Amino acid sequence: MSSEVALQTLVNGVALGCYLGLMAMGLSLIFGILRVVNFTHGVMFTFGAYSVWYLTSRLEMGYALALAASAVAIGLLGVVLDLLIFRRFRGLVLEGAVAAILLSLVLVNVGNLFLPLTHQNVRSPFTTVLHIGSAGVSSHRLFVVICAFVIVAALMLFIAKTRTGRAIRALQQDPYAAQLQGIEVGRISPLVWAIGAGLAGLAGGIVAPLQQLTVGMGDAPLLNAFVVVILGGMGSIGGAFAAALLIGVAQAALTTLWSPPLAVAVSYLAAMLVLVVRPTGLFGHE
Amino acid sequence: MRRGLYRSWSSGWRRGLAAVFALSILLAACGSPADEPTAGVDTPDDNGEDTATDEPMATETLQYGLLAPFSGAAASWGGIIEASITYAMDAINEDGGVVVGDTRYEFELVTFDHGYDPTMALSVARDAIERQGLKYIENGGVGVVDAIQPLAEQHGALLICLCGGNEFLGEDHPLTFRNFYDVPLSLMAMLDYQEGAAPDSGRRVIGIYPDDDAGHTNSDRAISLAEERGWEMTIEFIPRAETDVAPAMTRVLAQNPDIIDVGPSPDRLYTELMIAAGEQGFEGTWVFPDALHFDTVLGVVPDDQLVGSLSAPCPNPRTEAAQEWHDYMLEAVGAVPAWAGQSHDSVRLLALAIEEAQSVDPEVVADALGEVVYEDGVTAGGGPISYGHEDQFGIPRAFNPPYPVCQVQEGSDGLEMVEVNAG
């Protein structure tokens, strides 16, 4: 591999890692704290992308404002789903997962009914191509990287430093003890859903300009996000992001050196190995 | 109370059913015997000469089952195929349907959603073929043919499909027809054009094909045909639903291609490939042997990647019939992917074949379907269309349209697709 290709591979890997990290953080948060394997996360990613498309192309809203509005809307959708459905499955991991699978099928078909038949695109405000040495990267891909780092930092600060964040952490570590301390699961749960779903919507909106929008656009990143969450450790925001970067660089290198299908297969194999050897993930705790 | 209600409803239902039976027996008794000449059909008189009557012909319905994704990731395809078929059927029915002997058949479309999922496909194929007894089936979606074809063959149904794999066609499968153009031949049309238009340009072609049946089926033949013409060609495979294609593009560009061929890739995939190629500085030519869906890439893919790109078959309407179909599709579903015309032409060819065979028996119709030509086809911009490829499959079972070539050029109002070769 020449140095130019190696540098491009590294740039690709970091960009892919940040994309996966954006996708995985909400998933990790919802599972780590509420023990819900959220299969609707991919649909929320899709709805986030379509919301940004609708707001920017139909209502001619600015991209940044559309991103924020979309994240809020999808966050609210998460709250509604929690209040209507997932609160009934609190503590029931398997039943919750089955409910999430069924709900994602319903939401996909709702999407099929109401979303446009033809593929849509979101125009990015960042259109130039930047060069890092010999490696080329679009300014929008750089925007994805910056967003990922900013969101991870903000989320980690929120969890570590705020009163609500500490309550969330307490709930994650020991729900029973947390409730004895007066932390209400019924109050924290919608908040976690709002943040988790909002992050999925935000991720969809952020990567939308790099893709064509389809109802199934969330499927492939969702599988990769599960790999990231398993590797990083359920509920660990920093761990999920570190694992995402690791997976991103590994997939980019394997794709460039061998083939894309091999890269995906190796990622799944790594996740299986981690589940067998260290079920808490590389960065997770007992 | 509930039991009482049920009993009341049940006895009423039984009385209704008995009345329907009695009525149907009465109607059957009053009807004309089967061996009497049917009204409205040319019948020989005592002198052996035809005497046409003015009475209407017997009309029957010929059901055509469309098994396509109306849900799931490929849900958009179903509506597009349905609209194209509906356009053809409405025109056939308005023109008097298909006349076989003394019966006039009107087409009726029956749709089934297989969600591009083999399990669902098998389930809806059972419904369509076993339970409803449909004899004419069209399948939209390469990945589910395996689930449908055996059932269709077992029940003697004629299957028109996007069957990418060559193993689906041939003398062992006489009732299966492929209504899809030939991707390697389409590629050759563009390479031939490029050779004439830019004889001094490089001859290294890298294909990026989807890592599935459609991609693998076409790859060997594409390489073989390209190498016969003196091109150096290799193909990389990529999952259709790749999360990020930038690393795959780095791999391709490291091989210094002069031409990138996206094979039978969906527009979502090649859009992302072109965006990634723009970032990484590709300066060669893109070729689209499954036709470029221009509207979906315009304004999304960098202009410098689009300009000079070649697409075959060129989807620009070239005939009045193709233009009318194009306008209808735009109004009905807001999109006209190049492949959508094939379903329209499949139905038109089937109608011709049934009239030619003077039978609705799929086995008899299949022989005629391999022979008929529909002059007002809309596939590939319009023109005569038929099933061919006897040299490949032993019997004519795959669409054989012309391959006109389009090029993306800068026009006065921005980028446009211009036909540069009639194919």
Image (tube, grey):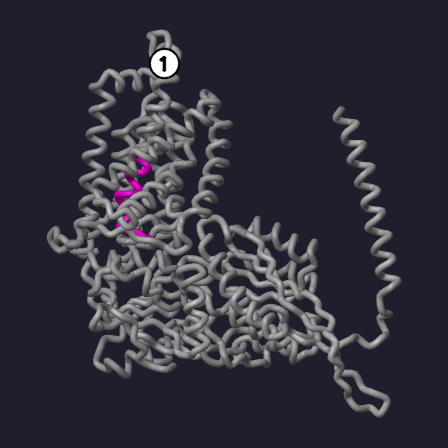
Question: Is residue A286 shown left or right of residue A16?
Answer: right
Whole-percent x and y of residue B359?
A: 70, 75
Q: Which of B336 and B327 is in front in this view?
A: B327
To which residue does mark 1 refer? A184
Which quadrant is home to the C terminus of chain B? bottom left
Q: Does the magenta stretch include residue A208?
A: yes
Subunit of label 1: A
In the depicted structure, whether residue B366 falls above or below residue B340: below
Q: Which of B255 and A34 is in front in this view?
A: A34
Whole-percent x and y of residue B348?
A: 56, 73
Question: Is residue A93 shown left or right of residue A238?
Answer: right
Q: Quadrant of residue A151?
A: top left
Mark 1 neighbour class, 10 Å CA radius: few under 14, some 14 to 19, many 20 or more: some
The single residue placed furthest to the front in the displayed view is B54
Residue at point 33%, 24% (across, down): A191
Q: Is the magenta stretch mostly helix, strand or loop?
A: helix
**Which element type, helix, strand or loop, lies under badge 1?**
loop
Whole-percent x and y of residue B396?
A: 57, 77
Q: Is residue A163 magenta?
A: no
In the depicted structure, whether residue A280 falls above or below residue A216: above
Q: Give the range drawn in magenta.
A: A199-212
